[in-house]
Image (cartoon, rainbow, N blue to C red):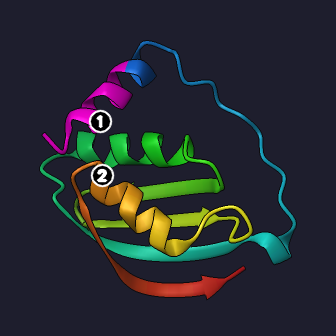
């Protein structure tokens, strides 16, 4: 049930509905956080999570790794909070625990 939104989003992304946008953000408006992600069952989960996160407002970049069970999210803290990122990831059926945070 939790993965329904994830699967729907991936279906739309694979159908070409998601349009890539170029985002320019000042360095002072960027924040990077690394999450340990529980719930990846295959590499497609990591790729799908990246696709969904990149479409989320305020997310600049996302890089997930199935073997490492991590995702690195670069985002604009003026637009989206870490709490809302974790909640969004949870809505997709995964559990995100903060691993390491740094400013860029």
Q: Quadrant of the C terminus?
A: bottom right
Label 2 secondary element:
helix
Query: Could you tell me what secondary structure mostly forms the magenta stretch?
Result: helix
- Quickly name the residue at label 2: 91
In this picture, is 83 found above or below 101? above
Side (left or right) of 28 relative to 47: right
Residue 62 location in percent, x, y?
Answer: 52, 56
Q: Secondary structure at mark 1?
A: helix
Residue at left 50%, top 15%? 16
State which tag comes first along the sequence, 1 or 2. Answer: 1
Quickly name the residue at label 1.
5
In the displayed image of the protein, which residue is found farthest to the top? 15
Disc 2: CA contacts within 10 A as few (<14), some (14-19) or many (>=20)? some
Residue at x 78% of width, y 46% of height: 23
Range covered by the magenta-colored residues: 1-11
Q: Quadrant of residue 37?
A: bottom left
Q: Are the two marked residues, 1 and 2, in contact with CB atoms closer than 8 angstroms?
A: yes
When the figure is inspected, residue 27 is found, relative to residue 12, above or below; the finding is: below
Write down the quadrant of residue 88 in the picture. bottom left
Q: Position of residue 72 (x, y in %)?
A: 47, 67
């Amino acid at each position: 049930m939790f993965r329904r939104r994830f699967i729907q989003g991936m279906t739309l992304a694979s159908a070409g509905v998601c349009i890539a946008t170029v985002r320019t953000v000042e360095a002072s408006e960027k924040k990077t956080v690394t999450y340990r992600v529980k719930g990846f069952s295959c590499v497609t989960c990591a790729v799908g999570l990246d696709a969904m996160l990149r479409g989320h407002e305020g997310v600049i970049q996302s890089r997930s790794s199935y073997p490492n069970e991590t995702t690195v999210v670069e985002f604009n803290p003026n637009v989206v909070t870490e709490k809302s990122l974790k909640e969004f990831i949870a809505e997709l059926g995964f559990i995100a625990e903060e691993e390491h945070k740094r400013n860029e």
